Amino acid sequence: ENVLNLLRPLIGKKEIWLVNSISDDMPAITADPNRMQQILLNLVGNAIKFTHSGKIEISARTDNRFAEITISDTGIGISEDKFDIIFESFEQADGSTAREYGGTGLGLAITKTLVELHGGSIRVESEPGKGSRFTFTCPISEEKADKNRIIGEIRHIPYTDINHEQSLPSADFPVSAAKIMI
Ligand code: ADP
């Protein structure tokens, strides 16, 4: 929910339905909460970036001792010959992607590393023009989820509260006084 709330503003004017279908009886997983958030931010962020309209859904199921989490979209899709290469650093599905959608080609490489460091794996199924499904696995916890113990929760700032006009510097802002740290 945190990830969806954080990313919802990126939909902008696109007609995208963002759905969390993870049921409440899903068992807890063993993971670093911040890194899990980073994995989800990347996968859902990509889904929003590469989808013009339709539905983006997060769902989860269990498979033995693992949870399988899937992020599906109805976006531009990826051709099968690119399924491996997109998980490599600085690689994008095709040369025009960077020009049209921006990005560094690093997100999926980092995501794959983080998933594997948790003992899981990640795969993609996709059809160009129809959409993509990214599925990663993560070990299920022996312990029960305790909502009071969740750390690093991000406060949801409703984006209607953000006044873009006010937060931008005025036209006579001295540019030399600005420092942007990335
Ligand atoms: P970036 O998004 O910064 O380019 P990523 O490593 O996150 O880098 O993704 C690599 C490439 O994989 C993207 O440039 C894009 O071509 C493809 N891709 C990733 N997610 C999707 C998606 N949901 N739909 C279509 N293409 C995707």
Image (tube, helix red, strand yellow):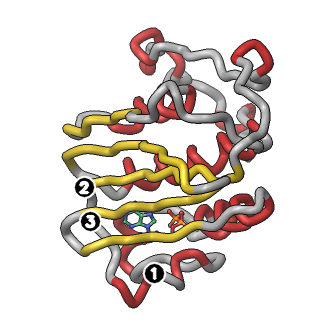
Q: Which mark is residue 74?
A: 2
* Amino acid type, label 2: Thr
Q: Position of residue 38 (x, y in %)?
A: 66, 46
Q: Is mark 3 within 8 Å of ligand 1?
A: yes
Q: Which mark is residue 83?
A: 1
Separation of marks 2 and 3 at Cα, in angstroms: 7 Å
Label 1 neighbourhood size at 10 Å, few (<14), some (14-19), many (20+)? some
Residue drawn at x 43%, y 84% is 82
Residue drawn at x 48%, y 47% is 61
Mark found first going from the N terminus, 2 or 1 = 2
Q: Position of residue 10 (x, y in %)?
A: 41, 37
Label 2 neighbourhood size at 10 Å, few (<14), some (14-19), many (20+)? many
Residue drawn at x 45%, y 55% is 46
- Residue receiving disc 3: 76
In this picture, is 41 found above or below 3? Answer: below
Q: Position of residue 178 (x, y in %)?
A: 71, 34
Please name whichever residue, 145 or 105, is drawn nearer the observer in this view of the structure. Answer: 145
Comparing marks 3 and 1, which lies closer to the viewer?
1
* Amino acid type, label 1: Phe
Residue situated furthest front in the rendering: 64
